[in-house]
């Protein structure tokens, strides 16, 4: 325990890490303001939930399509330079959104165009952001540093929406009750997010890359993307893990995104119950991330076995979720799921960052994120279709049994259970 305290003190005592952590807090909090303000802006300006969904989709489509390209450019030019550019771009885009709302020019076409541009920028900022940490801290500090950074993100996901909602309600939410022109709160939310990008760009400028990858002769971007895919495919551990995670996310992701709101609406007490259970799940994730910092690199046998064991436990907790009759029962199950998920999330990111050569890290992280971003809408659509023919008990039970079965089959039939921590063997590079 004393060693863990000393490790945390050493990490937090590093000015380089503190600059990065400060910028992450500012930027993540600002992101939550836009996540609340943008869908609300579309809803109050059009009154059409379908249009709101389409605008949100406009942000996710370019992110999924171009994230592999973003990863290749990150490896070519360095994560810091790409992240800096994306912050300046987002400063301008959010500033334009704020000006448009505050001056009363709320046109759906302009809102859609800016949402599309924000999504495009995130295709570059996501691989850059996930590739920064291995270039800022020592390899031995990565698990603890990831736990701190992910914990910060989780805290902002809990506090940010509450603050954004209060701000929008206080200064004007554009609803009919407040008058069509009274949308100042939404405009101020966008302005604060714009300022957060600018301020976090300044903190990022103070961060030094201590372990930057050596520069090589640039290759065509599409060829670089192909090289990243080839590297992941040729590495048995990466290939097995990516395929396994993609399959599990396809089946389980929709249950969390679509079936939970249906559960809250039909069995529990509506939107308030959904807020409670999702808040508890977020708190559990935060606790799991904090637990990873306390336990350090805790493993049951090795990395792969630990991941599979956690998936078995999560699957067992999903099975009874469709049978709950009270909010506290769902909250208890999701709290446990959140703790397990938060713990393994830190382990997965740390393993990827240590496994992949730094010259390929941007592409590897973009492939990892691409799997989940590409699977999410398909999983949500499949879950919505299945709920026309299945009960919630059947859906959650099936998803839980699938996760347990997939983990057991991966243990028996694939090399997943033998995957260890550490860098890729030199013979595989």
Image (cartoon, rainbow, N blue to C red):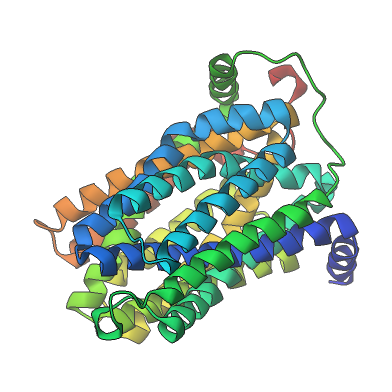
Q: Is residue 252 visible?
A: no
Horizontally, residue 288 falls left or right of residue 203, namely left
Seen from the viewer's position, the closer of residues 315 and 166 is 166
Horizontally, residue 285 falls left or right of residue 314, namely right
The image position of residue 141, as x and y in percent, is 81, 53
The image position of residue 67, as x and y in percent, is 50, 35
Q: Residue at x 24, y 72 (%)?
A: 263
On screen, residue 1 above or below 125 = below
The image position of residue 314, as x and y in percent, is 44, 61
Q: Quadrant of residue 19?
A: bottom right
Q: Residue at x 58, y 19 (%)?
A: 221
Assign the C terminus to one quadrant of the image: top right
On screen, residue 70 above or below 29 = above
Seen from the viewer's position, the closer of residues 311 and 196 is 196
Q: Quadrant of residue 417?
A: top right
Horizontally, residue 228 falls left or right of residue 252, namely right
Seen from the viewer's position, the closer of residues 230 and 126 is 126
On screen, residue 391 above or below 425 = below
Assign the N terminus to one quadrant of the image: bottom right
Q: Quadrant of residue 172?
A: bottom left
Q: Is residue 103 visible?
A: yes
Residue closest to the far left: 389
The image position of residue 89, as x and y in percent, is 58, 45
Count of numbered badges drawn on the protein: 0
Seen from the viewer's position, the closer of residues 79 and 203 is 203
């Amino acid at each position: 325990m004393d060693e863990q305290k000393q490790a945390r003190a050493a990490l937090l005592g590093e000015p380089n890490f503190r600059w990065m952590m400060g910028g992450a807090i500012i930027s993540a909090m600002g992101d939550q303001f836009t996540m609340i303000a943008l869908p609300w802006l579309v809803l109050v300006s059009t009154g059409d939930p379908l249009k709101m969904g389409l605008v949100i989709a406009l942000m996710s489509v370019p992110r999924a399509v171009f994230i592999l390209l973003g990863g290749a450019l990150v490896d070519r030019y360095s994560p810091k330079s790409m992240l800096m550019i994306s912050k300046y771009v987002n400063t301008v885009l959010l500033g334009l959104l704020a000006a448009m709302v505050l001056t009363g020019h709320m046109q759906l076409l302009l809102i859609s165009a800016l949402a599309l541009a924000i999504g495009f920028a995130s295709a570059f900022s996501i691989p850059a952001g996930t590739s920064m940490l291995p270039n800022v801290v020592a390899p031995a500090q990565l698990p603890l540093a990831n736990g701190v950074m992910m914990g910060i993100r989780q805290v902002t996901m809990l506090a940010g929406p509450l603050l954004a909602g209060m701000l929008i309600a206080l200064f004007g939410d554009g609803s009919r009750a407040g008058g069509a022109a009274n949308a100042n709160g939404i405009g101020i939310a966008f302005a604060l997010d714009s300022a957060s990008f600018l301020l976090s760009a300044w903190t990022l400028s103070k961060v030094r890359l201590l372990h930057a990858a050596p520069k090589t002769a640039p290759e065509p971007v599409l060829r670089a993307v192909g090289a990243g895919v080839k590297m992941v495919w040729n590495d048995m551990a990466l290939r097995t893990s990516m395929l396994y995670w993609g399959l599990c996310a396809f089946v389980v992701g929709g249950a969390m995104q679509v079936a939970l709101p249906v559960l809250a609406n039909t069995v529990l007490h509506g939107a308030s119950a959904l807020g409670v259970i999702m808040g508890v799940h977020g708190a559990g994730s935060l606790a799991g991330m904090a637990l990873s910092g306390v336990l350090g690199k805790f493993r049951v046998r090795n990395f792969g076995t630990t991941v599979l064991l956690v998936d078995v436990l999560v699957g067992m907790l999903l099975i009874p979720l469709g049978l709950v009759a009270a909010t506290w029962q769902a909250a208890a199950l999701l709290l446990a799921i959140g703790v397990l998920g938060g713990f393994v999330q830190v382990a997965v990111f740390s393993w990827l960052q240590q496994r992949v050569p730094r010259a390929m890290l941007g592409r590897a992280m973009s492939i990892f994120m691409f799997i989940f971003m590409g699977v999410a809408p398909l999983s949500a659509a499949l879950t919505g279709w299945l709920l026309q023919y299945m009960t919630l008990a059947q859906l959650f039970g099936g998803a839980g049994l699938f996760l347990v079965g997939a983990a057991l089959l991966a243990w028996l039939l694939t090399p997943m259970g033998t995957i260890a921590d550490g860098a890729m063997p030199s013979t595989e590079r």
